[in-house]
Amino acid sequence: ILAVLSVLQATLTLPGIAGIVLTIGMAVDANVLVFERIREEFRIGRTAMSAVDAGYSRAFKTIIDANVTTLLTGVILFIFGSGPIRGFAVTLCAGIMASMFTALVVTKLFFGLMANKADVKALKMLSIIGKTSIDFVGKRKIAALISVVLIVATWGVMVGQGIKQPSSIFGVDFTGGISMTFKVDERQSVEEMRTKLEGAGLDDVYIQYQEEMEQDGDVFLQVKTSTRELGDERKVIDVAQETLATVHPEGGLSLQQIDEVGAQIGKELKQRAVWSIILALLGIVVYISIRFEFGFALGAIVALAHDVLITVGIYTLFGRQLSLPIVAALLTIVGYSVNDTIVVFDRIREDLKLVRGKSFMDICNLSINQTLSRTILTSLTTLITVVMLLVFGGGAINDFALALCIGVVVGTYSSIFVATPVVLAWYKGRKPEFAKTQ
């Protein structure tokens, strides 16, 4: 990913980091899928080499479906999104192609070399979660009630706050303000700068460092803030320069660029962000309808809408503002959630062909239980990455990580308790058409 950014002479920003985080999660997921499949082959008595071959063969379709869906989302976001969202799309697309290559080619090469050794009889693989038979689908009404209560309660609070004070919900990107870019000699504490700027009367301060990728590249400091409190744009610039000068060494700070984010521009950014997400969701509907059926696409979209609504509601409940980086976090959640959901759907499709004498509901329950170990492993590994950002990252990184933490937990929940029950409700007990033709 960094090599692609270097070739494009692009700057790695927070939305770009969002794309990398999602790529890490999907790369882990692809390998976990393969390992789980290999473990299943060992359980039925295959040798090491045949288990590796069969494991990769059975995981191939799932990995392709999950990654192509997210790749399609990235392409749509790049075409229709604004600057930061396009940055997210670039890192996401580059990361997906790289992770697919490593998961399907590189790791298989290593496993093949290990399995071909004369003294290797089996590849030992620790199983954290054994075989389960939990009635997840039977709990769908309770899950639906919990989801509805969460959405109504959190969005009720958010809308109420937004009507009274829009700036409590929307950041400078959407409400308007000023963006200043400074060239600096060295990095300083972001939290110290934020505290001093807010103490000087600036409101809704967003701070981010950017660095050119070549060796000894220049370091830039971007500061976004509202002009509401001080009123005059020139006064905001002067206050910001004077305050930041007390933090940076003498002569180590120089103003390079000033961009005004007017209310109209903020409105356009909001519209483009919303349209980007809507078009990405439509792309997902089309792809899943082709690969599965419309009922499955409906289940995926309801789960994605559920994840975004709950994440936004809980995030704003913590007193945080929505900004373009948070839109990137929401897009990351969409990509993660659809990847998780596709894995369950793919197993349902496979079990419909293999399992006879069971109802569609029983097969759905079976499939969720079969993929439960992989779901939890992938969620935990992704969550570890995000929690590190939440604990050690300050300012905008902390906001971004909080949104991702909420989204990963909610996305895992929706893959189990939301997406599949919606599919069952659509088919009303009957099996999909593709199952009847088998």
Image: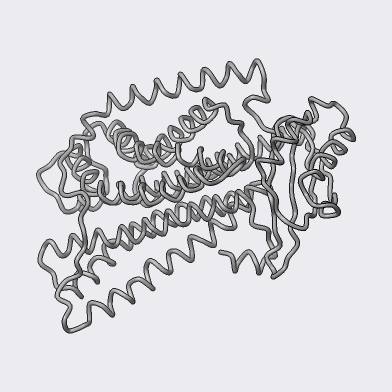
- Could you tell me residue 107's position as x and y percent? 35, 71
Residue 345 in view: no
Residue at the right extreme? 234
- Say how many tags the image has: 0
Residue 395 in view: yes
343 relative to 317 in the view: left or right = left
Toward the viewer: 334 or 355? 334
Q: Is residue 120 above or below residue 274?
A: below
Residue at the bottom extreme? 118
| Residue at left offset 68%, top offset 25% | 167
Q: Is residue 396 above or below residue 42?
A: above
- Could you tell me residue 127's position as x and y percent? 20, 55
* Residue 277: quadrant of the picture: top right
Toward the viewer: 366 or 52? 52
Q: Is residue 21 above or below residue 396?
A: below
For the N terminus, which image quadrant? bottom right
- Could you tell me residue 188's position as x and y percent? 70, 50
| Residue at left offset 34%, top offset 34% | 418
Q: Is residue 170 above or below residue 217?
A: above
| Residue at left offset 61%, top offset 49% | 14
- Could you tell me residue 246's position as x and y percent? 80, 43
Toward the viewer: 156 or 224? 224
| Residue at left offset 84%, top offset 52% | 250
* Residue 26: quadrant of the picture: bottom left
